[in-house]
Image (cartoon, rainbow, N blue to C red):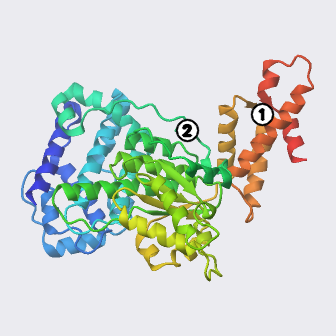
Amino acid sequence: MNAFHQDYADAVRRFRAALPRGLSVPSRDIDSYFRACALSVWARGPAGSGDLNGVHQIYTDKPCAFRQEQFQKAISYYKGDIRAHVPVPEFFRRMADWDKGHGTDFCGAFLRLQEQVLTLAAAYNGDCSLGETRQITALGRSLAAACGADPGAAERARLDRLLDDLQRHTETMAQDFWGPSPAPVTPPETARTDTPEDATQSPGERSAETEETPPKEPEVTVEEALRELNQLVGLEAVKEDVESLINLVKVRKLRQERGLKCPDLSLHLVFSGNPGTGKTTVARIVGKIYRALGILSKGHLVEVDRSGLVAGYVGQTALKTQEVIQKALGGILFIDEAYALAPEDGGKDFGQEAIDTVLKAMEDHRDDFVVIVAGYETLMPRFIDSNPGLKSRFNKYLHFADYDGAQLYEILQGMVERSDYRLSEEAAAKLKEHLEELYRHRDQNFGNARDVRNLFEKLVAAQANRVAGISSPTDEEILTVTEEDLKAVLS
């Protein structure tokens, strides 16, 4: 596997060449750190995901006398907590101090280098698992936290600025290794939102999306889509899983380029969680990411529920489902409340015909068609268990947790600002208390961001009723939502 060594050595050499004299880092220190990282990645993969020769490839200066028994012992050791076994290296902390003092971003450069090196390591030998790519993400987040970076969109956003800095040192290195900065892309109108789209759409509106063929999504880069994802309130576990999924796809592409075996990879997803937690919004972003990665040709989203797939007569369900599938080809078919297709007392229910038709399309159009199913966490297993083919195709689950009181207030505040309103101090304090209470006493009818949307609309109506009674109101009175408005809503 000399290609692995050559790619690794070249990447490290180029990174070191970009460093100023006052921030030199010995190659042996980088080697030691990356060997530990690679071992921790392989420790989370299937048997044989890394081997002794792979360790030897991560050494730029001289042979590494690493024996087989040492390798096996190391693999066992690195199964543990990354914070204990793969600590942040001292040279990275020096880079963080340098960046703060000089306005540079060498920490960002190293984070990108780490991602590329560990992607190579994960692709080195054997099957690549989601566990390995999750470890790559975890290692990156550990470093990002050490340099005070937002371990997600903020770090990736800083990489654009990194190119200019690297070019001042070695322009050739920047162009050959990091690549040119992507041209700016104007995001769609819905790109910047803190409010989950499924918090505001009714089932009827969602089904209506299938009446016309959705347009191709505007092209965005993976980084731009991730920035959009990271702007959403909460959903930290979902954000991490999406980043890990991206790494998984990157590794698979790398293996294909190297002529290595690529096990079957299912990119269909199960979203579980309560209503109003952002499942539709994230599904739309996943479509953009899949398009940017070359998995989908359009990346658009077609959203339906049972009523959009199932007809009332024998033989019509398959035709109705096929029509929806045709509109979703090249993008994502998002089936909300998918468990409704497999009712407990199914019998001869037509939902099974819809499931069978979707499964066939997933097989026939596997290269340009993705299905995401969503619903309550407790009910989705019923759907997955309803057909043996579903278990093999839906093996990646993303759970959307309920928003807590602070997150609900953050969502509300976003709605207020985007609509050009203001909250008085008294109203803001009372709203925080109310939303904390709403979260603490939530039941099966808790709507998360949907409840916040309803509350905001009622506040706007109450404020309008109050302001309408004021003769010649000031701009401040027109803009401000007061405690009186909140009392009118909650009374």
Q: Nearer the viewer, residue 325 or 183?
A: 325
Image quarter for residue 38?
bottom left
Q: Position of residue 172 (x, y in %)?
A: 16, 31
- Mark 2 and 1 residues: CB-CB less than 8 Å, in contact? no
In this rendering, position of residue 114 left or right of residue 206 = left
Q: Position of residue 327 (x, y in %)?
A: 48, 52
Q: Position of residue 381 (x, y in %)?
A: 55, 75
Q: Nearer the viewer, residue 207 or 390?
A: 207
Q: Nearer the viewer, residue 411 or 354?
A: 354
In this rendering, position of residue 131 left or right of residue 21 = right
The mark nearer the N terminus, 2 or 1, is 2
Foreground label between 2 and 1: 2
| Residue drawn 33% across the image and 65% down it | 265
In this rendering, position of residue 472 left or right of residue 113 = right
Image quarter for residue 360?
bottom left
Q: Amino acid at mark 2?
A: Thr
Q: Amino acid at mark 1?
A: Glu
| Residue drawn 16% across the image and 63% down it | 54
- For residue 345, above or below residue 164: below
Image quarter for residue 292?
top left
Instruction: Say which element carries label 1.
Output: helix
The label shown at residue 425 is 1
The mark total stands at: 2
Q: Is residue 271 visible?
A: no
Q: Position of residue 352 (x, y in %)?
A: 55, 75
Instruction: State how far apart marks 2 and 1 are (Cα).
Output: 30 Å
| Residue drawn 47% across the image and 34% down it | 187
Screen quadrant of the N terminus: bottom left
- For residue 228, above or below residue 81: above
The label shown at residue 190 is 2
Q: Is residue 1 visible?
A: yes
